[in-house]
Image: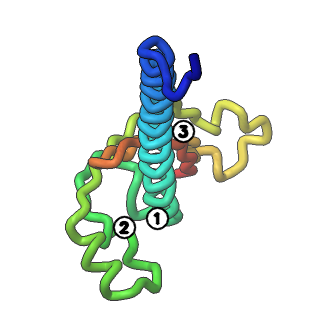
Amino acid sequence: MSKKGFTLIEVMISVVLISVIIASLYQLKSNYTFLFEKAKNEANSFWIATFFNTDKYGFKNDTVTLDRLSEGFDLDDDLRRFLKNKKTDIIYQEVRSIDLSETDTNQTQNSNMTLTIGKTVLKSNNGKTAFYRVEIK
């Protein structure tokens, strides 16, 4: 008797194997998509944080659009219009304030200076990022 086709068990086993492979590939795609979106959002949050290189923002609670944060930068008009629609909440929290007169052993004239360490949190639709700021008053 010559065998010209596949048996029912062989077909069922191959269908199960193909189904397992397709399901695992779909799961990998879902995981990588999630990780890519998370990395993209974190990169956007760090990109927003680069606008805080001035004393103008970051030392008080505020809600601003990103185009206000980028005032000192030379940006394309299309990018500026895009940033105009993106709102960011700035949440500032003073972590520590040190009166430098306590550490001044020479009692110099600058003894009324204060070192303030604060935490600035930026919250937007893409996510949030935080960084510490140091200010000497």
The residue closer to the viewer here, 17 or 54, is: 17
Graded by Cα atoms within 10 Å as few (under 14), some (14 to 19) or many (20 or more), the crowding at tag 2 reads many
Could you tell me if the residues under marks 2 and 3 are in contact, i.e. CB atoms within 8 Å? no
Could you tell me if the residues under marks 3 and 1 are in contact, i.e. CB atoms within 8 Å? no
Residue farthest toward the right in the current orientation of the protein: 106
125 vs 72: above or below: above
**CA–CA distance between discs 3 and 1?**
19 Å
Give the residue type at disc 1: Phe
Q: Tell me if residue 94 can be seen.
A: no
Q: Tell me if residue 1 can be seen.
A: yes
Secondary structure at badge 3 equals strand
Label 2 or label 3, whichever comes before in sequence order: 2
Q: How many labels does the image show?
A: 3
Q: Point out residue 109 in the picture as x, y percentages from the top left corner.
A: 66, 52
Graded by Cα atoms within 10 Å as few (under 14), some (14 to 19) or many (20 or more), the crowding at tag 3 reads some
Give the residue type at disc 2: Leu
Secondary structure at badge 1 equals loop
The residue under label 3 is 117
Q: Point out residue 132 in the picture as x, y percentages from the top left corner.
A: 54, 42
Q: Which mark is residue 123?
A: none
